[in-house]
Amino acid sequence: MQMRILFMGTPEFAVPCLERLLSDGHEVVLAVTQADKPKGRGYTLTPPPVKACALSHGIPVYQPATLKNNPEALEKLASCEADVGVVVAYGRILPKAALEIPRFGCINVHASLLPKYRGAAPIQWAVLNGENESGVTTMQMDEGLDTGDMLLTRRCAIPPDMTAGELHDRLSLEGAQVLSDTLKALEDGMLTPVKQTGESSYAPMLSRDLSVMDWGRTAQELHNQVRGLNPWPSASTRLRGKVLKIHRTRIGEATEAVPGAVVKQNPFTVACGGGGTLELLEVQYEGGKRMAGADFLRGRPVEIGTLLPD
């Protein structure tokens, strides 16, 4: 059965869901997304990925500044006469009045195994915290922050070297599949909402304050920091007074060296707390390009025993 869908989303993560709705034969009557933003060195005004995707498929786009206390926006949504609202990383909390507009309410696609990692950055915090599993949950939205009844879930292993960016790409595809399954179950009258139970956690937005590496932490903790902050804002240390971003690492051999000491040059290896080491596989010096750690040292040799941050 073709359903009339009101789609609300903003970043790249939401695009596979939008495309899956179309390939499943649903009619997306309106795409609601956030405002265009300046990007790049020239600060060119750039549409969010959902807007670009919607326009490429001839879907009308609406970019209200807010839905809260905005009768005009609510009237616009109501005029769509949607069967269901689909919300994927829209980036704003929806008021109760908006949630109640579609005939079957609003279904959210959230990139975690709820109730863990509610909030803005569930993918990154799962990696930062060293989780070995994540997933995607669809839920019937309520007024809370990711507190609605759960509908369907798909689980996904997090390999020990997977970055947040890689997990993002995987879960965006898993999200499209679980959304498709959820709407099929809704059509068939087979959805059974389940209350969220168990310990909940919150995944706040990332900031550059998380970037600086404390070499007194264990190699595993630092490895998770590098993975969780890749691609943004990136883990970093300082070398010769400049920022050295660290994009990829591998846990190395045990050492008795002081945490922060460079203990090997090929691969570029630094001592960590707890007697471990971290191999810096891909780095980027301030103002430079990303490159292999060993290549970086060939161009800018660092003596064994140098202490980071330097």
Image (cartoon, rainbow, N blue to C red):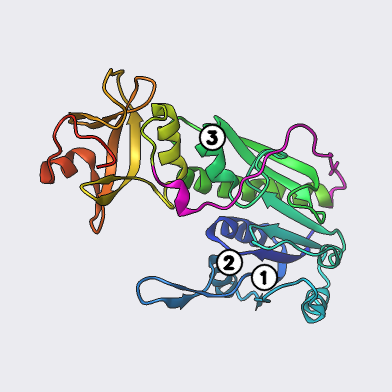
Q: Where is residue 45 in the image (x, y as percent from the top left)?
A: 47, 78
Which quadrant, please, contains the C terminus? top left
Q: Disc 2 residue type? A: Val
Indicate which disc, 1 or 3, sits on the residue closer to the N terminus. 1
x 83%, y 74%: residue: 78
Q: Give the left or right position of residue 153, taking residue 229 as reference.
A: right
Q: How far apart are marks 2 and 3 (CA)?
A: 29 Å
**Secondary-structure class at tag 3:** loop
Q: Residues within 10 Å of mark 2 (few under 14, many from 20)?
A: many
Q: Give the range drawn in magenta.
A: 187-212
Q: How many labels sit on residues?
A: 3
Q: Name the residue under label 3.
A: 129
Indicate which disc, 1 or 2, sits on the residue closer to the N terminus. 1
Q: Mark 1 points at which residue?
A: 31
Query: Hey, which quadrant is residue 251 in on the image?
Result: top left
Q: Disc 3 residue type? A: Asn
Q: Disc 1 residue type? A: Ala
x 86%, y 58%: residue: 104
Q: Residues within 10 Å of mark 1 (few under 14, many from 20)?
A: many
Q: How far apart are marks 1 and 3 (CA)?
A: 34 Å
Indicate which disc, 2 or 3, sits on the residue closer to the N terminus. 2
Q: Is the magenta stretch mostly helix, strand or loop?
A: loop
**Secondary-structure class at tag 1:** strand
User: Compared with residue 245, is residue 36 higher up or lower down, i.e. above or below?
Assistant: below
Q: Distance between the residues labelled 1 and 2?
A: 8 Å
Q: Mark 2 points at which residue?
A: 50
